[in-house]
Image: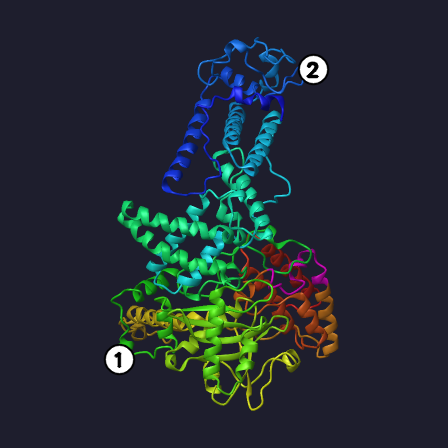
Amino acid sequence: MSENSKNLNGEVKQEKTESNHGSSSSSSGGSQETTRQDSIERILQRKQRVYQLPRNQKLTKLSMYSSCQADQCRCSGWKTPEENRHKDVEVDYCPDFGEECRNPNCKHSLETHIRHLGDINEEQMNELLGAIVDVENLYMSMLREADTDTKKVYAYLFRLLRQCILTRTQAVIRGPLGDPPFETPSISKAVTNFVLHKYGHLHHSELDSMTEVAKTFLHCLNHWNFEAPSARQDLVNQEDVSNYKINYTRWLVFCHVPAFCSSLRHFETSIVFGRTLLKAVYQYVYQQLLAKCKTERDRMPPEKRSMLTQLPKFLEALKQEVVNEDSPIWTQNFKPAASLVLHKSKRQHDGSTTSTAGKKLGDVKRFKKESDCEDLSDEVVSRALKRINDSNYASRAEVVFPPNAPRDEAAKAEENRREIEFHVVGNSLTKPVTKQSMLWLLGLHSVFAHQLPGMPREYISQLVFDPKHKTLALIKEGRPIGGICFRTFATQGFTEIVFCAVTSSEQVKGYGTHLMNHLKDYSTQRGIKHFLTYADEFAIGYFKKQGFSKDIKVARQVYAGFIKEYEGATLMHCELHPSLIYTQFSSVIRKQKEIVKELITQRQQEVQKVHPGLTCFKEGVRSIPIESIPGLREVGWRPTFRAQRTARPLEESADPDKLANSLSGVLLAVRQHTAAWPFLKPVNQAEVPDYYDHIKYPMDLKTMTERLKNKYYVTRRLFMADMARIFTNCRLYNSPETEYYRCANTLERYFQTKMKEIGLWDK
């Protein structure tokens, strides 16, 4: 430590230092949070007082942390003369610039230490003074800290800031800790996914309530003081200890210390950390928050009290997803329920669109351009949604003809009431299996053995407890009452369903359908798009209801040798759509039908008008344009425009080879144009996940080249239509200010020019 650092304790008055942020305490109770906020507030107040000092006093403060400017002098800060040691430069002391430094190896004047600071403005000076306050608070925190590892981190940050003040540079943390974010998805993203996954089916008011609970949890996590590694006696695995120590250090450096030390860039814990940290601290945070709910409930205002009532349920449900290795909330491609999309009035997109061709498409921020075709406005759809969500709303058709309830309606209602739960469980040879999982596997074995008497019990045991197989368990009152045993072949892209059964006393309640829907969602979130199973004569009807067919659309070489074959059974296949949420599919369809019915009702009310009769014919008019008839457009009529051509001035050659040669020259010239790079290849779905959701008929220059080789373009119109589709798709997906939009315009003009040169353009 430098000479100035050794003497810093003498320079900093302890009664002035406001930092009280030692990390050895891990409680996040209200009193500590109040203390933390009070400390940060006092630090800010002290900085404001320093900023308001006269310039001479500011320069004196800076001189204590500035190197002496005299030649060959190595003094790193002006030291107050002994007779003035009791005086405070921030309150009542402004020395003469001629006073000498107390350092015996320096003894240069104060003016010599601040010679280089004469040209800095007030803003730069205040920034340096703020860093000095941070350094002093860090030093006092380091002195108070009992934990050795934490003390080392404080010392490192102290030296870093001290050096930045000397060199007048911005503090940048580099080294083996890496740069935030440290893990994806983040805790915040996973909790958002959890709310959508677990509560997305609820009414919007209930969903908003659970969203507030989630925000409260994230707020607590962002202000939590985590335990030092030395205090974590529960971490017995060396890998867990090492991971926690790294994440704890990262948390100190990037989240905890910057909260009271504004010279360092501050990051929210929930934004830069992911599953590893949450899993390591969740049990303790969970217990402390539950205890806080009990003690704080009566003291909270009524509007907050309801939130505290829901927090324990939220924490318990989230706990299951934190410990579950296969939880979908931690997947990168998690998709929210389709029903939630109906509530969004406008969808914006950031990211890439067309082919890269050597350029980073993420460099430009783009938004999906709204289609030019006529559509209902957001306001109209919002009114319809508000109407059908009204508690007094009842469709007239449904009063007379009640709709048939989906097969899994009752099961979904029970799941919403938490009467049943669904868990994916399995055995493992590489990591410990929880006692609960093993008990569920034993219970599932009994269900399968009882419901599938034709299967040997030993064979059922072999598959249920095989680590390569997993089972989606339906849990009711703490015990499994049904399940689907399956094995996923990720390299082949399909899942084999081995056993599927529900105990006889719980059948005909929609559990089988809801089980299969959960398994479909589980599979699509992992990129699996096909189910295969061998069904006996009694199970064929069930699988048909779940979307299975005897028409196998997977090539035999894909599954042959992988799937288990059974004599006397029928192979059945089900293709999954990756954008569907199967557990909510029926309710989404019903909601869409209700919206359409309400829109039709609204439109009928608008168009049911009586217009006065036409009188123009009485005045001698023999005919009028059809579009001038009153009320015709209101009911949806639109004019159809057809090109009026008496003759075509030019024709393509009747010789297909000659036409192909002409078109080949144009296509080659277009491909070599400098604006063609976004359109050379098909759009990569991995880079632009939502592109094919919006562009239903994609086209690119590579595909056109292949079509030209295969003699597809028998007329120039087909060739021109494909080229026009490239430019239309680009302008539909991208906004006008993007580079891609400009490339489409440039290349389209060039294409038209080339077609005119060979006499094949007559537009």
Q: Which mark is residue 400?
A: 1
Q: Is residue 348 above or below residue 453?
A: above
Residue drawn at point x = 58 percent, y = 83 percent: 552
Quadrant in which the N terminus is drawn: top right
Please state the horizontal and vertical placement of residue 54, each as a whole percent of the image: 47, 17
Q: Left or right of 619: which side holds 181?
A: right
Q: Is residue 516 visible?
A: no
Viewer-side label of 2, 1: 2
Query: Secondary structure under badge 1?
Result: helix
Rendering coords of residue 366 (x, y %): 54, 54
Q: Please tell me whether residue 588 belongs to the stretch shown in magenta.
A: no
Label 1 crowding class (10 Å Cα cut-off): few <14, some 14-19, many 20+? few
Q: Which residue is mark 2?
A: 71
Mark 1 residue type: Val
Task: Using the image as rendered, state which of residue 733 and residue 296 is in the foreground.
Answer: 296
Question: Between disc 2 and disc 1, whose residue precedes?
Answer: 2
Which corner quadrant holds the C terminus?
Answer: bottom right
Q: State the extent of the magenta-drawn residues as a range.
A: 669-687
**Do labels 2 and 1 touch, CB within 8 Å?**
no
